[in-house]
Amino acid sequence: MENLIIGSHVSYKKDMGLIGCVEEALSYQANTFMFYTGAPQNTMRSAIDEEKTKKAFDLMKEQGINPEHVVVHAPYIINLANPKNHDFSVRFLKEEIDRCEQLGMKKLVLHPGSYVKLTREIGLENIVNSLNEVLTEEMNVSICLETMAGKGTELGNLDDLKYIMDHVLLKDKLMVCLDTCHLNDAGYDLNDFDTFLEEFDQKIGLNKIGCVHVNDSKNERGTHKDRHENIGYGTIPFETLLTIIYHPILAHVPKILETPYVSANDDTKEKIYPPYLFEIKQIRDKKKNTQLISDIREFYKKD
C-alpha cells in the first residue's frame, strides 16, 4: 500500500474525548483525521480529559497514526475580518489554540473571515491585525488558513492569503489548507493542477501547504457557492481528485475528507451514514465506485 496520509472529519464527543476521534478514524481505515474541539457553531467546550488524551496517543502509536498529521478545525463563528466580532474572535481563537496545545495537536485550520459591509482591503487588514494579536513565538500550533469559495464577502483566494501571509509578523506560524471544492468553486482549474501549484508557489510557497481538504463539488467551476459532494458524484473528475491526492509534492501532507453523510434512501433528506470508509477505499484502490451510495446504505443498514 502506498504511504498515503488520508482520513476524514470525525466527531469529538465530551464522554470520549480524543480517544473517540481515534477510534472513529480507525473504523474508516484512515491513518489521520480532523476534528473540532466542540461544536463549530457555538462556544460550548468541555474540559479536556488528560487520561483520555494519553490513551488516544497510545492508540495512535499502536495503529500507526502520526499525531503530527492530525488536524483540528477552528469553529466557523470566528470571523477575524469583521471588527464587530474582533474581541470575541481573538479571544476564542486563543482559547482554541490553547485547547490544541493541551491535546498535543500541531495544526489548526481557520476560515480567514468575511468582510461583510466593509471593503475587501479593510477586511484583510483586520485579519492581519487580529492574527498579530493571536500569534506568539511560544505557540506550537500552526494556523492553516483555508482556501475559500468566495461566497458573499468571504475572503480566502490565493491573493487574499498572500496578502495576509506577507503582512503578518509571525508568518512562520501560518500555513494553508487547500480545499478542492472551495478551489473549484472559486474558479481555479484543478484539471491543470500543476499550473495551480506553480501559481501557489509563486504567491505563497509550496512549503506552506499544511493539509488538503478533499471534497467533490456540487457546483461548476467559478460559481462561488461552496457545496460539498461525495467523491465521484460532483463536478470535479475522479481522476483529477486522484491526481491531487497522489501528487508527489503533497505526499507528506494529510488529506482530509469532508464529504456529506449519506441518507438512508432517496426519499429522505436526513443524512445519517458516514461515507468515509468507502470513499477512502476507492481512493486507495484508485478506482471510482459507481455504486458508492448504495454500498454505504447496504453496509450501515446491516448494523
Image (tube, rainbow, N blue to C red):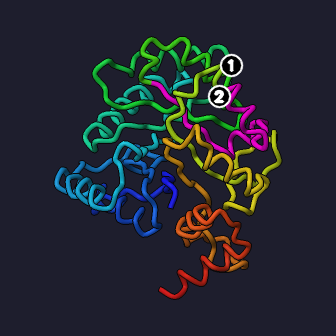
| Amino acid of disc 1 | Arg
Q: Residue 261, how many percent across, how many down?
A: 59, 66
Quarter of the rendering containing residue 203: top right
Q: Is residue 202 above or below residue 289?
A: above
Q: Give the main secondary structure, helix, strand or loop, of the magenta stretch.
A: helix
Q: Residue 273, how many percent across, how many down?
A: 55, 72
Q: In this view, does 127 lie above or below 56?
A: above
Residue picked out by circle 2: 155
The residue shown at (45%, 20%) is 131
Please tell me whether mark 2 sits on a helix, a strand or a loop. Answer: strand
Please tell me whether mark 1 sits on a helix, a strand or a loop. Answer: helix
Determine whether, in the image, residue 162 is placed left or right of residue 288: left
Determine whether, in the image, residue 177 is placed left or right of residue 71: right
| Amino acid of disc 2 | Leu
- On whether residue 186 falls in the magenta region, the answer is yes
Span highlighted in magenta in the image: 174-199
The residue shown at (76%, 36%) is 188
Q: Residue furthest front?
A: 1
Q: How crowded is mark 2: few (under 14 residues within 10 Å), some or many (20 or more)?
A: many
Q: Is residue 294 above or below residue 119?
A: below
Q: Nearer the viewer, residue 94 or 54?
A: 54
Q: Which residue lies furthest to the bottom in this view?
A: 302
**Circle nearer the N terminus (2, 1):** 1
Circles 2 and 1: CB distance less than 8 Å?
A: yes
Residue picked out by circle 1: 120
